[in-house]
């Protein structure tokens, strides 16, 4: 067994190092901050949908060309266990500015009437500050309803809800921001590396939070304590803790393990580390996998994507996760690590039942592997009540090879229509070997409408889900009908 992990823990908050003495393993960052008098961050929903609890964390830069070693990353403090930030650097709305010396984001929100009643404003401030300091933000003067002439992307605020419905002045404030001025301390801080992750052990009241230093140590813990709850971004587990009051005797954090944070671009495959956040993956891939590039903007909100990991989205086994349908279409493999070594399992064979999988208690998802070359005809369709920041009623991922007007290969992944994500095998068979024409697609669409075992719930009826499946394939066809390799 590895050496004992030191029991001391602390966080640097607004420039001051604060010890985590006597903190229970399941204490959220939000509760801890508010307990210390930093009450700017609020609890609105306790499940990562409203953004009232947003704070900034110093994280590694995602774009080497930008020259920024650190990025100020906005996260939901209500979901992150405070123990997960041991050794890290956090800034709250109080640390950005004061009533006598406002931060530029605070000033613009104030003068343009964007503060409204003020309850959610500190969360908006932190999310917008992360966008203000985004190293790749450049303004070229172009502007639309989602992007400002200063390069601000309003999707940075997609996880923040204003309860007074006053979004126009918030948008105006965002679009009025200039670049950080010379001498801006937070901008200057980005030239230095963020604090390195450090091993952590907190044990209070019969519950433990452990951050192992290596993958081997994490796997040893799972052998000794198979009941351990593994967490990464905690965007799923945090909801269980807050809403359902679930408490695990041992929580093992794997989000900063270096063995789970690689991204490899090889000739015949792309391998994505399970502990990379969706934001990190999105920026590092930079559109190289078009199907995933379609998924990212529709996955929850930027606040959630800043913490949620691709391994976690698979590991929870949810039938309505957004990445599995796309990954199934991409023929993804899951790399599982254990003390016995590694094994590779096709994602199509990974799920065995509702939130169940072939992963053994002593295994961790180390990476997701995508074969190359990629199919040229791809699409991701998410049917939900809201355009963004919502859970899908149905999600469909497509990856088709069409050569000489004939479908030579098809992979279709489905979510929200069965107890697990699944491949639409019957529909794939109805397409392969047939001409890529509207007649073929309509016949295949009728097959797709019968795939899975959709159910009635508060998000959609079974009949609606089935109808959306069929319409989805027709939409894919018409979206690609004007391309040379896919003649109508």
Image: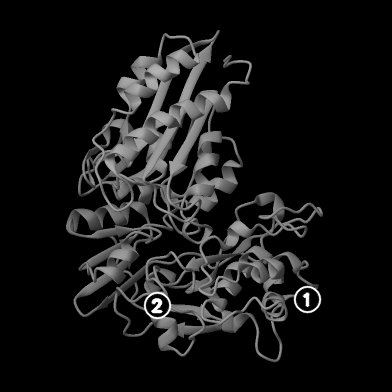
* Point 50% across, 58% down: residue: 306
Tell whether label 1 touches label 2 (CB within 8 Å): no
How crowded is the residue under tag 1: few (<14 C-alpha within 10 Å), some, or many (20+)? few
> Residue 159 location, x and y as percent?
51, 62
Percent position (x, y) of residue 150? Answer: 76, 60
- Is the residue 289 above or below the residue 219 in the image? above
Q: Is residue 71 visible?
A: yes
Up/down of 223 relative to 442, above or below? below
**Residue in view at x 31 percent, y 85 percent:** 22
Tell me how many marks there are: 2
Residue with the mark numbered 1: 183
Q: Tell me the crowding category of disc 2: few under 14, some 14 to 19, or many 20 or more residues within 10 angstroms, Cα based.
A: many
Residue underneath mark 2: 9
N-terminal label among 2 and 1: 2
Q: Position of residue 53 (x, y in %)?
A: 47, 74
State how far apart marks 2 and 1 are (Cα).
Answer: 31 Å
- Name the residue: 32% across, 22% down: 447
Quarter of the figure with residue 80: bottom left
Q: Which corner quadrant holds the C terminus?
A: top right
Query: Image quarter for residue 246?
Result: bottom left
Q: Secondary structure at mark 2?
A: loop
């Amino acid at each position: 067994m590895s050496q004992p992990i030191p029991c001391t823990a602390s966080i640097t908050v607004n420039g001051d190092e604060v010890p985590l003495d006597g903190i229970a393993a399941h204490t959220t960052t939000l509760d801890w901050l508010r307990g210390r008098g930093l009450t700017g961050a609020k609890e609105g929903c306790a499940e990562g949908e409203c953004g009232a609890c947003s704070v900034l964390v110093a994280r590694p830069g995602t774009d080497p060309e930008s020259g920024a070693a650190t990025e100020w990353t906005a996260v939901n403090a209500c979901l992150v266990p405070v123990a997960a930030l041991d050794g890290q650097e956090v800034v709250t709305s109080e640390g950005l500015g004061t009533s006598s010396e406002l931060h530029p984001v605070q000033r613009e929100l104030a003068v343009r009437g964007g503060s409204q009643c003020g309850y959610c404003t500190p969360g908006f401030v932190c999310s917008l500050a992360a966008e203000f300091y985004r190293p790749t933000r450049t303004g070229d003067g172009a502007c639309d309803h989602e992007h400002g002439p200063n390069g601000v992307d309003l999707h940075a605020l997609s996880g923040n809800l204003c309860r007074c419905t006053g979004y126009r002045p918030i948008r105006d404030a965002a679009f009025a921001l200039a670049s950080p001025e010379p001498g801006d301390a937070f901008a200057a801080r980005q030239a230095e590396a963020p604090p390195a992750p450090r091993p952590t052990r907190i044990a209070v009241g019969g519950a433990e939070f452990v951050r192992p230093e290596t993958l081997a140590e994490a796997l040893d813990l799972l052998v000794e304590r198979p009941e351990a709850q593994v967490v990464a971004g905690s965007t799923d587990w945090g909801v269980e803790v807050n809403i359902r009051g679930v408490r695990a005797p041992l929580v093992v954090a794997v989000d900063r393990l270096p063995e789970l944070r690689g991204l490899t671009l090889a000739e015949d495959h792309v391998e994505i580390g399970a502990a990379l956040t969706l934001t990190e993956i999105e920026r590092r891939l930079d559109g190289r996998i078009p199907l995933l590039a379609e998924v990212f903007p529709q996955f929850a909100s930027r606040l959630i994507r800043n913490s949620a990991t691709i391994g976690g989205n698979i590991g929870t086994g949810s039938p309505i996760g957004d990445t599995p349908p796309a990954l199934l279409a991409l023929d993804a493999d899951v790399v599982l690590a254990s003390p016995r070594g590694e094994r590779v399992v096709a994602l199509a064979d990974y799920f065995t039942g509702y939130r169940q999988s072939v992963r053994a208690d002593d295994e961790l998802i180390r990476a997701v592997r995508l074969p190359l070359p990629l199919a040229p005809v791809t699409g991701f369709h998410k049917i939900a009540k809201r355009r963004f920041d919502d859970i899908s009623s149905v999600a469909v991922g497509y990856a088709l090879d069409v050569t000489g007007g004939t479908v030579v290969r098809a992979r279709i992944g489905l979510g929200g229509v069965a107890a697990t994500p699944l491949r639409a095998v019957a529909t794939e068979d109805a397409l392969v070997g047939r001409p890529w024409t509207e007649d073929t697609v309509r016949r295949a669409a009728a097959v797709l409408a019968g795939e899975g075992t959709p159910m009635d719930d508060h998000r959609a009826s079974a009949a609606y889900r089935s109808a959306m499946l069929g319409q989805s394939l027709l939409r894919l066809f018409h979206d690609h009908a004007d391309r040379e390799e896919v003649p109508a």
